[in-house]
Image (cartoon, helix red, strand yellow):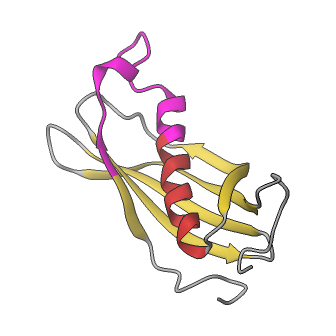
Amino acid sequence: MSATGDAAERELVIRVVAMPGDTNPDGDMFGGWVLSQMDLGAWIQARKHTHHRVVTVAIDNIVFHKPVLVGDCLLVYATTERIGRTRITVRIDAMVERKETRAVEQVTEGRFVFVAIGDNWTPVPVAG
């Protein structure tokens, strides 16, 4: 693997419907729910690059552009940006397919950094 990761192609890693149980009092999805889906999608992407456990160590540059509404389909796209010795950086673009119109819009974006860890919970080489 190169230091910049594999081909920088965006891949759909999660598709999930926003349900009423995860809304705030105004009826929009909690940002924490969206962030959780993004973290899960980034983990799915990071695991493709190592056989070790990976854990989230940083979440950077999260920007919420638009709300996610009940019934929208959240689409989480991942791009591996960098593979270091022990770390993997994944860019996430969260889009929605609107329930009523089927229009696709970007709602959130950010970067997630993972570290590969061994049995004693200390960093290990990604390729090791």
> What is the total number of numbered labels drawn onto the structure image?
0
Q: Nearer the viewer, residue 41 or 10?
A: 41
Up-down relation of residue 55 to residue 10 (above or below): above
**Where is residue 71 shown, x and y percent of the image?**
22, 32
Residue at left offset 14%, top offset 37%: 100
Q: Is residue 88 magenta?
A: no
Residue at left offset 46%, top offset 79%: 9
In the rendered image, the residue lying farthest to the top is 25
Q: Quadrant of the C terminus?
A: bottom right
> Which image quarter: residue 112?
bottom right
Q: Left or right: where does residue 24 sit relative to residue 46?
A: left
**Where is residue 107 shown, x and y percent of the image?**
43, 45
Up-down relation of residue 41 to residue 32 (above or below): below
Q: Is residue 24 magenta?
A: yes
Up-down relation of residue 60 to residue 117 (above or below): above
**Where is residue 77 shown, x and y percent of the image?**
43, 61
In the rendered image, the residue lying farthest to the front is 119
Q: Which residues are magenta?
A: 15-36
Residue at left offset 77%, top offset 76%: 84
Up-down relation of residue 10 to residue 42 (above or below): below
Q: Left or right: where does residue 20 sit relative to residue 24?
A: left
Q: Quadrant of the N terminus?
A: bottom right
